[in-house]
Image (tube, grey):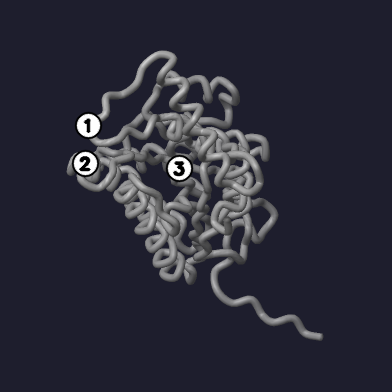
Amino acid sequence: MCQPKHRGVKSRGSGDMSVSEGRVVVTGATRGIGRATAHAILERGGKVIAIGRNADLLEELHRQAPERVRTVAADLGDVEQLSAVADAALAAFEGVDGLVNCAGMARYERVGAIQLESVDAQLRLNLIAPLLLSQIVAEHLRDRGGAIVNVSSTLSERVAPGTSAYAATKAALNAITKAMALELAPTGVRVNAVLPGVVDTDMIRVPRLRPGEAPPVGKELEARVEAQLEALRSRHPIGRLGWPEDVATVIVGLLDHPWQTGSLVTIDGGLSVA
């Protein structure tokens, strides 16, 4: 039986080498999901262009694989820097094959206490930075193929008190993922997003304060954070919070799957069905 003739652009990942074995830009690479993703790519033999704010942590990552890690220290919330950051990332290994937008922030503010500065900061880092970086990388990948993965959140679809602005930025990121996937598919560039549940990172170890409440300190802070973590664990039917490595595994899969684009992939320990 004759096989159907291939049409369209051959995306990297459908040949001998997957995207994760190539050159991948990872934002937010010094902590949490971003750091775990960088390690996962290195374990597969790939090269990482790590972007983050903490130069010391970036250097620590570089020392682990100096021939296969390049670093760019930058605050992606400063949108005026994004073009220069992208240029540095593209030049690090003379091109890239993929992009993982991990950098993000959450400000827990209930209605009545939401600050404009907080909304602006979350919009810049969670939405504008991945949008503009993806646009630049997509132009580089056009007609040669590659993949972009955005790190969203289950809060984009199932909100919680105090997360109005954060949830809105992640919902918008989902829409960007689908729109870019549709527009870029003919060029061979795939765009997907991963929606984690609660993952045990620095972000969730910040106490969620009531309006006007002073931040706790010392043992009170420790007790407050542990109670918060236990409450979050109890919402996940699988019985624990996520680990950054859980999410990194899915991200690598999305980088490499040659026929997957426009997907919002949930990994949440059953949170969304509880």
**Quarter placement of the N terminus:** bottom right
| Mark nearer the viewer, 3 or 2 | 2
Name the residue beneath numbered marker 2: 113
Which amino acid is tagged 1?
Gly
Q: Check the image and report above or below for 91 versus 151.
A: above
Q: Quadrant of residue 109?
A: top left
Q: Check the image and report above or below for 26 versus 188.
A: above
Residue at 32 percent across and 43 percent down: it is 125
**Quarter placement of the C terminus:** bottom right
The reply to whether dot 1 and dot 2 touch (C-beta < 8 Å) is yes
Name the residue beneath numbered marker 1: 212
Q: CA distance from mark 1 to mark 2?
A: 8 Å
Give the mark nearest the N terminus, 1 or 2: 2
Q: CA distance from mark 3 to mark 1?
A: 31 Å
Dot 3: element: loop
Q: Check the image and report above or below for 95 versus 190.
A: above
Give the mark nearest the N terminus, 3 or 2: 3
| Mark nearer the viewer, 3 or 1 | 1
Residue at 18 percent across and 43 percent down: it is 116
Which amino acid is tagged 3?
Cys
Rendered image: mark on residue 102: 3
Total tally of numbered discs in the picture:
3
Crowd rating for badge 2 (residues with CA inside 10 Å; few <14, some 14–19, many 20+): few
Place of residue 13 in the rendered image (x, y in percent of width and height, measured from the top left): 63, 57
